[in-house]
Image (cartoon, grey):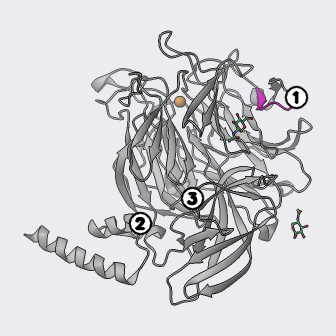
Amino acid sequence: MKILFLFIFLVGGLYEQIKVNALPTSSNLQARQNNQDYSLGTWNLVGDSGVSAMHAVVISSRKVIFIDRLEQNHLLRPDGLAAISAEYDLETNQARPLTVYTNTFCSAGSFLANGTLIEAGGSNGDKMNYRDGLQTLRIYDVSIGDWIELEGVLPSNRWYPTMLTLPAGNILIIGGSTAAAGVNKPGINNPTYTIYPPTNGVMQDINFDFLVETMPYNLYPIVHLIPNFEGKTLLFVFASTKGIAYDLGTGQTVTKYPDLPGAFRSYPLTGTSVMLPLSPTDSYNPTIMICGGNKAQLISSISEASCGRLELNTPNAQWDTDNFGGTPRVMPDVTFLVDGSILFINGGGSGYAGLRKGNGANALFPANDPVFFPYLYDPFAKTYKALASSTIPRMYHSTATLLPDGTILVAGSNPSGSVTLDVKFPTEYRVEIYSPPYIFSQNRPNILSLNSLQINQQRIQITYNQTVTLVVQINSANAPSLKASIIHHGFVTHSTNMNQRYVYLDIENSYESAPNQYVLTVRIPPNPTIIAPGPHFIYVFNDDSPCVCGAEVLLNSQQST
Ligand SMILES: *[C@@H]1O[C@H](CO)[C@@H](O)[C@H](O)[C@H]1NC(C)=O
Ligand SMILES: *[C@@H]1O[C@H](CO)[C@@H](O)[C@H](O)[C@H]1NC(C)=O
Ligand SMILES: [Cu+2]
């Protein structure tokens, strides 16, 4: 009876809400129904990933691809074999099995300039149904909606490599080991990089000594593009405690940065990294932030509670460190929010990345003390705010990614050698959506069109330094305070979000074209070192109220019409 009364009360309140706010979102309705306090955001369990989400990548406004590894997932392909990759529909919350025959265990991914997703590397097959993935390159073909695998294409084995889209639109594949290891060691280290598609027709490995100098904590090296106006391909590369700026064109290290104080930051003492939002107001001056990790590969070792920030183009730059909000984390994930704030999420308070030893009650997990709450980090004020907690530990092999509606998809966690459900940290299939506080703000802008085209029917082609016209609806009596940005959502695995990028866009002109309707002219960044070519989303936000959905674009050097 009490419940029924509450229900009527809430539905009544809800009806009022819809009348006042013409742009309700499903999550804010749900939060009101659940009578949740949404000032700290809310968590919703939405579906089953079908395969454990070791790797996650947004491929369109409503689809995410998950890639696991060879294991007996419950999602089966039409041929009866266990799927190791799935396409997850964000509207229906259903996972569709994809076809992968080679082991993707601890691999990497990145997009080509033409918008095609490339995945590479992995581990050994099972000598029955699945083959080796160590030298495999996989292409997600949108026309068939499935993977095409090119086996033996990589010149060397790559387990735990990093991939990065270059300004020229091809992809760097760097580092990793040539065989399985809990930690890298001489003999299996792969201190080289290769480029796909190759510039001269043949893929070859090029030596990269930095990955010798950073042994043994150098797997999944941290790599970000450094913006410049000289047409150079400059990379920030970091592993262990060391970082450099490397000119890929000349093969020279151009800057050796000071060591980052504190713990080790790379696999298996895994931290995370993000290039803070870039802005035209300071000529895209890049600052890198690296957080978490651990000082020793011991189960009992408390994770690292420190972050470092470094301005990459400042002469004699020094690390500016803090206490990571006061919470130690190993294997944290980091993702941008639409308004340029940053979310640190997932991970453990002790231990390191790796697989469980032993079974049942005797199971020994290398990482423990799951951190259930995200931090909202303000890159301007340098402050951390603890947000609402999940109830699901997200330990080794978990992922988090920004979705085009401004929420965060959180999935995976699988610190076992094969699917295991009856242990403290089981193979996790539950997909959660975390809605940050800004999702519940009033008057979210709604992008009606981009260059007169309806958004999210297809990727809208744009090019560098172009002006783009957005028509935006905002149901507010007050004059809006609008900002715009372009975000590449990246490819996430092992606390490494390859290519994740946030760039504020200059709004060159704006006017109210009809009641509650605004026309904005925004300028796309001037060159591909600021944001690499590929599929991105353009966002508008009013104060910190994010648009209902970003507009998917394909940014390329030439516009093909
Ligand atoms: C993009 O380029 C790759 C490599 O050249 C090719 O395999 C793929 O089919 C292209 N995709 C599209 C959509 O043109
Ligand atoms: C971008 O376009 C503006 C206006 O057309 C022009 O003045 C400027 O030189 C261009 N910048 C680049 C880097 O091409
Ligand atoms: Cu792994």
Disc number at residue 200? 1
Q: Is residue 292 visible in this depiction of the protein?
A: yes
Of callouts 1 and 3, which one flags the residue occurring earlier in the amino acid sequence?
1
* Mark 3 burial class by Cα count in 10 Å: few <14, some 14-19, many 20+: some
Q: Secondary structure at mark 1?
A: loop
**Point 39% across, 36% down: residue:** 50
Residue tagged 2: 40
Hey, which quadrant is residue 282 in on the image? bottom right
Amino acid type at image mark 1: Asn
Amino acid type at image mark 2: Leu
Q: Is residue 199 magenta?
A: yes
Q: Magenta segment, which residues?
A: 192-200
Spot the residue most to the top: 127
Viewer-nearest of discs 2 and 1: 1
Viewer-nearest of discs 1 and 3: 3
Rendered location of residue 216, percent (x, y): 67, 27
Q: Is residue 443 left or right of residue 32?
A: right
Hey, which quadrant is residue 435 in on the image? bottom left
Rendered location of residue 477, percent (x, y): 51, 90
